[in-house]
Image (tube, helix red, strand yellow):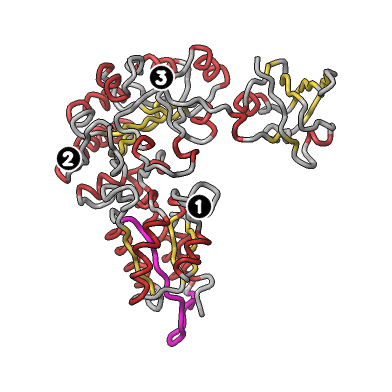
Amino acid sequence: MKKFIINGVQDDSILYEMEVEAGDVLLSINGMPVTDVLDYRYLIADDTLVVEIEKPDGEIWELDIEKEFEEDLGVEFPEEMIGTKTCKNNCIFCFIDQLPTGMRESLYVKDDDERLSFLTGNYITMTNLTEAELKRIIRYRIMPMNLSIHTTNPELRRKMLKNRFAGDVMSYLEAFRDNGIQMNGQIVLVPDYNDGAELEKTLKDLTAFYPMLQSVSVVPVGLSNHRQGLEPLRSFTREDALKTLEIINSVHDAMEKEHGDGFVYPSDEFYLLAEQPIPDIDYYNGFPQIENGVGMMADFKASIDDSLHQLKEANRELIQQGETYKRIGIITGNAAFDYICSLVADIKKTLPQLDLEVFPLTNHFFGEAITVSGLLTGTDIVGQIKPMLVDNPRDLLLVPENALRSGTHTLLDDWTLETLSEALAVTVQGVPVMGEDLINTLLEPNKL
């Protein structure tokens, strides 16, 4: 069994006080062996622990620890200690296969790891989930599990994932349901494959797993210009999107009526493709899959409306007539341009002196079919925004944070907010896709 070697110990943590050091081996917690980060996370979730440590000289320490239930022991570990399991599928819709060459290596890693499903919210196909790993999920009560389902038709799933072992999805769903493991599901929809009647069947099958299957999102396939040698696929047309919304909302409305929960939700992109209004926040029942772009725009609008209402209620005179304020530009993808413009119009009704401009970008880096803001790149921002600034100068440019690598200032093509600012000679700042954050950014500090 692989040893769990401690990479570091946080200062002033429990293990630091007990003189545990980097290079020590974490053998067990409460008698259970520690094989990876997931074991560690679950086994420390108690207020009384017996921790077994092996020192470099072979001496075994047995530490009796009393702590708060959620308190960490202080173990530090590098990302590679997770030992990420890579994907065994060759999905016809995989976006990683559509990346251009020359990007950072980590972007080309295809993970399909049940531990990351819990730790970071990644979706897994279950095609490399062993019986032992399934039992561990059930034993530890790891949930919710985030599952890439795509279709419940075994033959079609094998075809779409290009894996002869990919057809057996229902038995995993049944095992999770029957053992009380909550789940969320995702369907990447591909025209002429799992849409239409196949989508109707899949959604009907999945409703049988409610409420343990808490929600299902349906997102359209993303197609870049870098599909050389890959399966020929087409994008959704407006007519396709309309038909897809009809199928999804038929199930959504029936589940809402029967259970008070819509269960299945289309991504915002389907509404934009269909040129239909984004539903209000009540449609999304608490936004169970907002990280998948499901309801993000409705939540954004509601948050802006609430922030503007609070400004009016407080009767704050934030902007005085005759003073000069920053000229602010908001960068977005083509898909959301009209919607963001409508939100800016609402903002200016309350804050008329703000000088706001929305800059839409065409995605030349991945291809014009990619229209979402989360895949914006520095290359396109510099190439397209710089000429616009000649006739429409700005003092501040805002980039949605979903275009940045989590916890960093770095875009997909390794441009940073700092290098963008330098190239454009304008401050470029990330802003969360939350209305309150946007309003606060527009106002503090704004005056020149």
Q: Which residues are magenta?
A: 316-333
- The residue that disc 1 covers is 410
- The residue that disc 2 covers is 240
Q: Amino acid at mark 3?
A: Thr
Q: Quadrant of the N terminus?
A: top right
Location of residue 125 in the rendering, given as x and y in whole percent from the top left corner:
40, 24
What residue is at 36 percent from the left and 65 percent from the top? 385
Element on which disc 1 rests: loop
- Classify 10 Å Cα crowding around label 1: few (below 14), some (14-19), many (20 and above): many
What residue is at 22 percent from the left and 24 percent from the top? 201
- Write down the quadrant of residue 227 in the picture: top left
Element on which disc 3 rests: loop
Q: Is residue 323 magenta?
A: yes
Q: Amino acid at mark 1?
A: Thr
Nearest the eye: 157 or 14: 157
Nearest the eye: 306 or 369: 369
* Precedes in sequence: disc 1 or disc 2: 2
**The disc label shown at residue 73, or none:** none
Position of 46 compared to 59: left or right?
Answer: left
- The residue that disc 3 covers is 127
